[in-house]
Image (tube, rainbow, N blue to C red):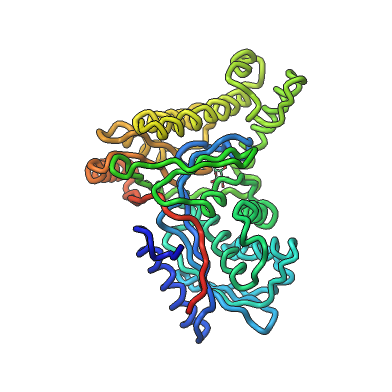
Amino acid sequence: MSIFSSTSASRRADLVEQARKGFVERFGHEPEAVGVAPGRVELLGNHTDYNEGFVLTAALDRGIAIAGASREVPEARVTTLGRGDTATFDPQNPRRDPQALWSDYVKGIVDQFNKIGANIGGFDAAIASDISPGAGVSSSAALLVSTAQLLLNLHPHPLAGDPMALAKLARRAENEFVGAPVGLLDQFSSVFGREGHALFLDCRTLAWRSVTLPASQARILIADSGVKHALAAGGGYSERKAECDAAALWFAEREPDKNIRTLRDVTPAMLEAYAGDLDPVLEKRARHIVYENKRVEMGAEALESGNVAAFGEMMSLTHESCMRFFENSCDEVDTLALTAIAHPGVYGAKLSGGGWGGCTAIVHHPDATESLCAALTETFTAKFGREPSLLPTSAAQGAESFRFA
Ligand code: GLA
């Protein structure tokens, strides 16, 4: 399918054109190909992915385009159009930048390609983006996946025909090269996105299905708190992951017959039966994950039966659980979510992504967009002395690549 055939296509076409032009300006000739990949919004399933649970996600109509061409010399030069930074490296031996730069995501993909024997020679590339890093819409996954798409176009490999393997490779790049212990949510969303649809993924079996988001009834607004979050090892994200693993182990020791590997295997009944016995912090973390998996299943079913209100309620319950049990929100995100939840025409709102900043995902009736934006701006500005950045968006197609004529 051509990237110019969908409603969010004109935005994507602009991004591709920016990358192409930027490439020509920087390298003095036309690029051969482009990879383009969207960011994502996590609708339900907060921190469930690495617990082998369920997620409900959508790809956004914004993302990253990376235009490129092969080189004779075995050297890669990758430039970002926004900041004009260039990273130059040996594709046979990419090394992590000590300052943990954006280029680590590009190098991480090259490193994974080397590991699967896809021989990446020299290349030049230019990156255009219409999502800001740290905003909680996974610009990182968009960069990983668009780079993979570009390189597969420049160096054909069977991976191109296996989108789940591609998503998994992009996750490994983030885990192993960048050093962020993330799950599959972001990369999966960026690869599999479908216009007008959410995607339900079982992160253990990797079975997935798409679920209609009825645009006449429900719109997505992303409200960015402006508080930057990071997922790197050592931060709150890896601490939560370790707590979830510790809680799963605690249950596994108590219930040796139940074959508990992760919190995916702990049922609400089990959790309640042991409530008060395990460490109170671990119990809170487990409570969030165990019930979050239920909320994802119920929310997806509600959407499938056309009940957007019931789906939205699950989102708001998730946010409450983030605040009370997972403790991965912050004042700015809470202000956006709670203001939205109280606003007429809003079905539900929640923190989207890792937490401790980033953005709030709000699902609302199309008629409410304007008044909702005004209410969010007013409340947030009164409290924090600056405006939140608000992004009305819609569920879009996943990643693709093509060759320039
Ligand atoms: C980040 C990670 C994802 C996921 C979410 C929380 O976006 O990259 O893998 O864990 O946080 O649901």
Residue 13 lies in quadrant: bottom left
Q: Which of 253 and 381 is in front in this view?
A: 253
Q: Percent x, y for residue 400? A: 51, 62
Q: Nearer the viewer, residue 330 or 313?
A: 313
Q: Percent x, y for residue 156? A: 64, 69
Report the side of 16 relative to 233 (left or right). left
- For image coordinates 49% across by 55% down, the residue present is 398
Furthest toward the front, the residue is 1
Using the image, determine if residue 166 lies above or below residue 150. Answer: above
Furthest toward the bottom, the residue is 28
From where the camera sits, is residue 287 visible?
A: yes
Residue 264 lies in quadrant: top right
Using the image, determine if residue 160 lies above or below residue 233. Answer: below
From where the camera sits, is residue 97 visible?
A: no
Report the side of 264 relative to 323 (left or right). right
- Tally of numbered discs: 0
Report the side of 80 relative to 97 (left or right). left
Furthest toward the top, the residue is 273
Q: Percent x, y for residue 362? A: 36, 40
Q: Percent x, y for residue 207? A: 59, 40
Using the image, determine if residue 185 lies above or below residue 14. Answer: above
Q: Nearer the viewer, residue 375 or 368?
A: 368
- For image coordinates 54% across by 31% down, the residue present is 326
Ligand 1's image quarter is top right
Report the side of 98 relative to 393 (left or right). right
Using the image, determine if residue 194 lies above or below residue 90. Answer: above
